[in-house]
Structures are given as C-alpha cells and as structure tokens.
Image (spheres, helix red, strand yellow):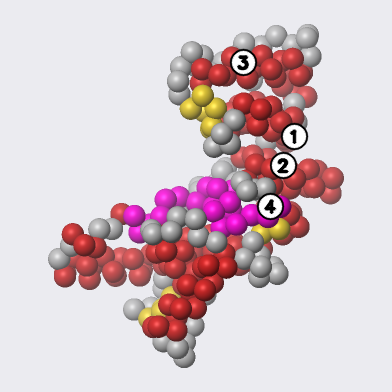
Amino acid sequence: MNSAFDNLDAAGFLEIWQHFDADDNGYIEGKELDEFFHHMMQRLGPQVRVANPFFPHTSALLPVFQLASMILPEEENFLLIFHREAPLDNSVDFMKIWRKYDADCSGYISAQELKAFLKDLFEQHHREVSSDKLEEYTDAMMKIFDKNKDGRLDLNDLARVLALEDNFLLQFHMDASSKEERKRDFEKIFDHYDVSKTGALEGPEVDGFVKDMMELVRPSLSGPELDKLRAVLLHHCDPQSNSLLL
C-alpha cells in the first residue's frame, strides 16, 4: 500500500469507516470504495493522490478487517490482532475468555475489563503498547463492537471481537436421525465440548455447551441469561454436581 497511508491512525480509519458503513454491519459495498478513498484522501491532505486499488465498480462487500489490513500501518492495525491467529472454533475456549475478563461477574465486559484483555493480548504477542495507546485502542474497540452503545460488551459483541466460528451444533439434525445416529451424534457433541477429556463437562465446558444449545433457539443470548440457563440445566441433570456426565 502507498506510503501516503503511513500517517493514518486507527482512530482516523474508524471515523472514516463509520461514515460509510451506514448500517453498522462491518462491511462496505465495493461500489462505494471510490467515494471512501476520495474522502480519505481529503482527510490526509490535498498533496496525496492514490487511486482505489480495490475492485472498483463492483457490488462485492469488503469487511472492515480486510480493508484495515490493506491500509493501516502495522503498528496501527489493531483491528486485526484478534484475527492473525486462527479464529476460535470452540465455544469452550470462548467462555474461558469470557469468564476470565468478566471480572465482576456482571454478565458483561466493561471498558476496563476489555482494556485488561487487550493488555494481556499485546503481551502475549510480545508487543509493547503505551498506556495512552492502550486507552485509544480500548475506546476504538468499544466503538466498533458495542452495538447497542451501552458502554459494555455482551456475549454476542465479544464473539464478534474474537471471530468465533459458527455454532458447532448447527451441523446436527437430530430429528432426521435414527436412534443409532443420534447416539453417535451425541457422543461427537459431548467429545467436542469435553475439551479436558475427563468424561464430564465442567466449568467453561458447560458454559460453551449451554451457549451453543440455547443460541439455536435464541440467537442473542446475554451473559445473565446464560448463567440462569446453566443453573437450570445443572439442577435438572444433577442437583449435587456442577458438571454434566457422559
């Protein structure tokens, strides 16, 4: 990408993106990219002359992460730090993160809790980030992913942050299976969530299973709702235990 973009920071990119992503779905139509770049050039200064390099005059949708990776300098490309590694493919791993950073057990991730997550993530990638920069990144991430603008992230918001893959249970059609096939599918499902391979679902393993199971009928499940459903399931299965056995 042209060095003219070297002075563009994450906050500036976000401001321009939100101007064009009118429906706030994380995509911009390919046919609007020329206007997007024209607006960006005006922001960067009249001396900058860069043509739209992204498939002009098409109706394709370009995601924010892809565009950010092409435009932002490496040190400002915080939008992709969650996507450089393979996306999460297991709700158990997702719930481990949720439980760790929902430090006050409110059922939501606050801005301060998100900052703690970002700090740990940068340290994991051996990257030094100043306090001011960390604050900027936290604010920007909240603006992008806090869809209802209540100053906190719910389960669905964090799933978008972490690029959690599709619900594992969507691949199963229990009503259309024989008894033998249902038994085989049940064992496959249990094995998927039994990450610790103990023959029992415990802690985040129960959380992940409940999350995926309930989202089949209630797509926008909140943290407090998950906790209630988890308690009901455990009480129904074994009131004396905090685990589900095979």
Query: Where residue 27 appears, x then y in whole percent?
Result: 54, 32
178 or 219, which lies in front?
219
Work out how far the residue at label 1 is from the one at label 2, CA to CA, in angstroms. Answer: 7 Å
Relative to 29, is 52 above or below?
A: above
Amino acid type of the residue that numbered disc 1 sits on in the rendered structure: Ala
Q: Give the side of residue 99 with respect to residue 233, left or right.
A: right
Q: Earlier in the sequence, mark 4 or mark 1?
A: 1
Q: What is the secondary structure assignment of the residue under circle 4? A: loop
Q: Position of residue 195 (x, y in %)?
A: 44, 68
**Going from the N terminus, do you reach mark 2 or mark 4 first?**
2
Task: Examine the image and state in which quarter residue 99 appears.
Answer: bottom right
Q: Nearer the viewer, residue 11 or 198?
A: 11
| SS for callout 2 | helix
Q: CA distance from mark 1 to mark 3?
A: 19 Å
State the residue at coordinates (51%, 17%): 31
| Labels 4 and 3: the sequence-earlier one | 3
Q: Nearer the viewer, mark 2 or mark 4?
A: 4
The image's mark for residue 140 is 2
Q: Position of residue 169 (x, y in %)?
A: 35, 59
> Which residues are drawn in magenta?
151-170
| Residue type, mark 2 in image | Ala
At horizontal 46% and vertical 17% (from top left) the residue drawn is 58
Depth order, front residue of 237/244: 237
Is residue 201 left or right of 113 when viewed as pictured?
A: left
Q: Mark 4 sits on what residue?
A: 150
The residue that label 1 is drawn on is 11
Disc 3 crowd rating (10 Å Cα; few below 14, some 14-19, many 20+) is: few
Q: Which residue is mark 3?
A: 35
Tell me which label, 2 or 3, sits earlier in the chain. Answer: 3
Label 2 to label 4: alpha-carbon separation: 14 Å
Q: Is residue 245 left or right of residue 173?
A: right
Is residue 191 within the magenta segment? Answer: no
